[in-house]
Every structure is written in structure tokens, then in C-alpha cells.
Image (spheres, rainbow, N blue to C red):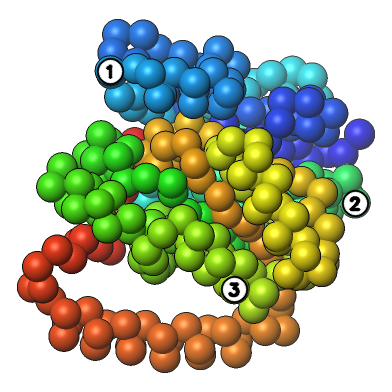
Amino acid sequence: MSMVRIVTDSTADLELTYLEENQIKMVPLQVIYGEETYLDKIEMTPEMFYKRLVVSDVHPTTSQPSPMAFMNAFEEIFSETPEAEIVCITISSRLSGTYQCACLAKELIGEEKEPKISVVDSKTATLAEGALVKMAAEWAREGKTRKEIVQLLEIHKSRAKVYFSAGTLTYFQRSGRLGAAEAVIGNLLSVKPILTVENGVVVVAEKVKSRKKAIKRLIDLAKKCVGQDNLIAVVSTSDPEETDYFVSLFEKELNIEVDSIFVLGSVIGGNVGPGVLGFGYIEREEGSKKDKEKKEKKEKKEKKEKKDKKGKKGEIEETEEAWIKL
């Protein structure tokens, strides 16, 4: 048994069977429907969540775990393996207060155990966060120390990427991320935003018109950066037929095999709704410098274009921080 144990939260969207098999402790966030509160993944599965989301008049919210929930997870590990050290990986601190709660739990656990715990802000969420957790678990199995794992996570977390597109703007509006008028106009124009996580927040990477064009654009993005050696998974909350179509297209166009389909969890899923399609990957190290230079040029160009377009009627406003903290 490895001397280093991994802790994460439910936003990593990892299957419970995987967590159990790899002795990873998962601290759930809370899903709130009016006065009803459920533990994410434990009392409210993604399947249950999306089924209720489309029929409920009450839009769900989510809440971070308490510091006590993290402390209990840490104590369980020390009870099982007194000599263990812990690496705790959380959702981006710019998306949730979960990281701060984990840090507080570390401070409160006591002088003897506190130095044995490292809390890492993943700066991302969902399957990209999950990929970091999986890598940390693998490094622990290889016998790497807690400090070595933390150092590797700091290197890799900026390379874990995810792109996905929502099927409708309705849930953006219901969750307060978009005005009602903007959502109506966007839906009438069939605007399909393509989202990603940058600098720890979910942002609109691009906007395209029509579902067909959104899927094509996702495939085009994948062609530039994804191969069998660095694909994390395809992500979906869509119906099985559309998911199968997307996966078959993904495999055909990229000439790779998709062996993992990720279900987007309730924390981000509540804001984008059902009908999500996307993918995640680990950016190749050799291409990261070149990609960074390309990205900087693209950002300068987009900044100029946004400035020129500012004030145009019917534009859906984008903000640097597209999500309100949980």
C-alpha cells in the first residue's frame, strides 16, 4: 500500500467504483433543490440530477463541503494508515470555496498531522480535475513522495484542458449566468457557446451558430491537439444517440479510439443543462511553448475584435469570470 493517499471532491466527476478500487477519498459537494439538500454523487447521481433538472420548476444550486467533511476524510485515512501522507486535489478556487475549506481542515486537524497534508488547487474542474486525480494516484502507486506528487501536479495542471458545448442557453439564464433577453435572442439565433476552463474559471472560448457547427468546431479543436496518447475522455450529458454519433465522428476524424465517456456532474451541469458534448486532453509538453505563443497572438487579436464589436446590438456579453462562485 502506498504511503501517499489521495483525496478529492465530487466535482472531479470520477466513478465511485474507480475511487474505491484506488482508495481515493471523495468529499461530496451539496446539490440543493429548494429546501432539499443532497450529497453530490452519493445521494444525487448525475442521471438523477439531469432527469430532475428538465422537469423541475426549481433550479438547483450547489454548495461547497464543510471543513469538517474534509477533516473527517483526512482522519479516516490516518485511522486506516497512521503513517500515511495526503495529497488533496480540489476544484478551482475561482469556481468554488471548496479549496479554502480543505485548507481550513488542514489547519484545524492538529500540529502532528497538518504537515503530512498538501492541498492542491487544480485550477480546473470536471474531467480535467479528474485526470489530475488519476495521475496523482498513479504516481502514489509508483512510490513517489507527497512533495514529488505536488510538484508534478503544479506542472501538469496547466496542461489539463477541456472543451464542451451546451445544447441550449436556457440553463445559463435559469442559473443567472445570462440575462433572460440574451438567452431568448441566443436561442432564436441558435447560438451554441463553446466553453473551456482558463485561469481557473469557465469561460466562453467561442460562439457558433447551430448544433451541427458546434460539433464540427469541437472536432476541429480536437484535431489540433488530441491523440490516443493524450486524450482524457469524451464528455457528455446528451441523449445516447447523439453521444454515439459524436463519439463515432470523433473516432473517425481523429483516427483514435475513445475508451472513456465522462458524464458531466451536477456542479457545472446545473449551469449548462443537458445536451453537453465535449472532450478533455492533456496538453503535450513539447507543444506547450508553441501553443502558448499561438494563444497569446490569438488573445491579442480577439481583444481587438471585441473592442471593435463593443456595443453591437444582439451580442451576448462575455465576462472574464463567467461563473459565480459556489
Q: Residues within 10 Å of mark 2 (few under 14, many from 20)?
A: few
Place of residue 122 in the rendered image (x, y in percent of width and height, measured from the top left): 54, 52
Helix, strand or loop for disc 2 = loop
Place of residue 254 in the rendered image (x, y in percent of width and height, measured from the top left): 75, 70
User: Residue at coordinates 32% horizontally, 82% vertically from top-left?
Assistant: 302
**Residue 83 seen from this side:** no
Q: Quadrant of residue 87?
A: top right
User: Residue at coordinates 64% horizontally, 78% vertically from top-left?
Assistant: 224
Q: Residues within 10 Å of mark 1 (few under 14, many from 20)?
A: few
Please say if the residues under marks 3 and 2 sit with CB atoms less than 8 Å apart.
Answer: no
* Residue type pointed to by label 3: Asp
Q: Give 135 or 189, whichever is nearer the viewer.
A: 189
Left or right: 118, with 145 as reference point = left
Mark 3 or mark 2, whichever is nearer to me: 3
Please say if the residues under marks 1 and 3 sit with CB atoms less than 8 Å apart.
Answer: no
Q: Give 2 or 15, whichever is nearer the viewer.
A: 15
* Residue type pointed to by label 2: Glu
Left or right: 320, with 20 as reference point = left
User: Residue at coordinates 82% horizontally, 69% vertically from top-left?
Assistant: 255
Helix, strand or loop for disc 3 = helix
Instruction: Give above or below for 16 relative to 116.
Output: above
**Residue 211 seen from this side:** yes
Which mark is first along the chain, 3 or 1?
1
Q: Which residue is mark 3?
A: 220
Q: Which quadrant would the N terminus be assigned to in this image?
A: top right
Q: CA distance from mark 1 to mark 2?
A: 49 Å
Q: Which residue is mark 2?
A: 142
